[in-house]
């Protein structure tokens, strides 16, 4: 008795792989977080930004313990959203991504309106980050309807 499966007829199309929300949403969160990180790292390569950082003030913003704590809490939002998108029950995962996506989109858009004129790299990363977090929000609202999409 043979254990091989019969060959699929040439006319039958192979099924398309379509990852579900439990893969797409965390991947988008990871992409956004890497953009946040690399944008900040690249900022240190500009001599004027590095010199300003060493004074404790960049673009009129003082780097106080309170400011740094606020920045840490802000960056915890997408980190938490990524984790919950992977492990939390469907309603928690979905609505955390919606809320976090809205918050991070608005925060990033607002950073373009204060301080010194943004660099080209900052504008590039901001466009990527805003597009990504807005896409997360849209995807979680429009496409993530049920938890059966675990793939």
Image (spheres, rainbow, N blue to C red):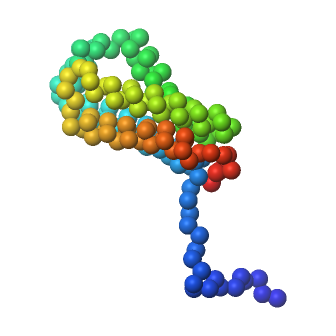
- On the image, which quarter does residue 125 sit in? top left
Point 24% across, 14% down: residue: 60
Point 57% across, 32% down: residue: 96
- Left or right, 35 with respect to 136, comes to left
Point 72% across, 83% down: residue: 4
Going by the picture, which residue comes out furthest to the front? 142
Which quarter of the image is occupied by the N terminus?
bottom right
Which quarter of the image is occupied by the C terminus?
bottom right
- Left or right, 138 with respect to 22, comes to left
Going by the picture, which residue comes out furthest to the left? 48
Instruction: State whether residue 84 appears in this view.
Output: no
Look at the picture and state if 136 lies above or below 148.
above
> Which of these two is toward me, 137 or 2?
137
- Left or right, 49 with respect to 93, comes to left
Look at the picture and state if 18 lies above or below 29.
below
Q: Position of residue 134 (x, y in %)?
A: 43, 38
Point 26% across, 36% down: residue: 123
- Left or right, 92 with respect to 137, comes to right
Number of numbered callouts drawn: 0
Look at the picture and state if 49 lies above or below 36.
above
> Which of these two is toward me, 95 or 33?
95
Q: Position of residue 143 (x, y in %)?
A: 56, 47
- On the image, which quarter does residue 109 sit in? top left
Q: Position of residue 93 (x, y in %)?
A: 61, 36
Q: Position of residue 105 (x, y in %)?
A: 41, 32
Instruction: State whether residue 8 appears in this view.
Output: yes
Look at the picture and state if 151 lies above or below 50.
below
């Amino acid at each position: 008795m043979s254990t091989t499966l019969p060959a699929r007829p040439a006319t039958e199309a192979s099924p398309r792989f379509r990852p579900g929300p439990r893969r797409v949403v965390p991947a988008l969160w990871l992409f956004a977080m890497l953009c946040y990180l690399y944008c900040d790292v690249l900022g240190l390569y500009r001599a004027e930004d590095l010199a300003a950082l060493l004074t404790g003030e960049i673009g009129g913003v003082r780097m106080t313990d309170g400011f740094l704590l606020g920045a840490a809490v802000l960056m915890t939002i997408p980190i938490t959203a990524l984790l919950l998108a992977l492990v939390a029950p469907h309603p928690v995962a979905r609505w955390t991504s919606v809320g976090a996506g809205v918050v991070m989109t608005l925060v990033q858009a607002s950073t373009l309106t204060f301080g010194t004129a943004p660099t080209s790299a900052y504008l590039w990363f901001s466009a990527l980050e805003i597009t990504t977090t807005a896409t997360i929000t849209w995807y979680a609202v429009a496409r993530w309807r049920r938890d059966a999409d675990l793939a």
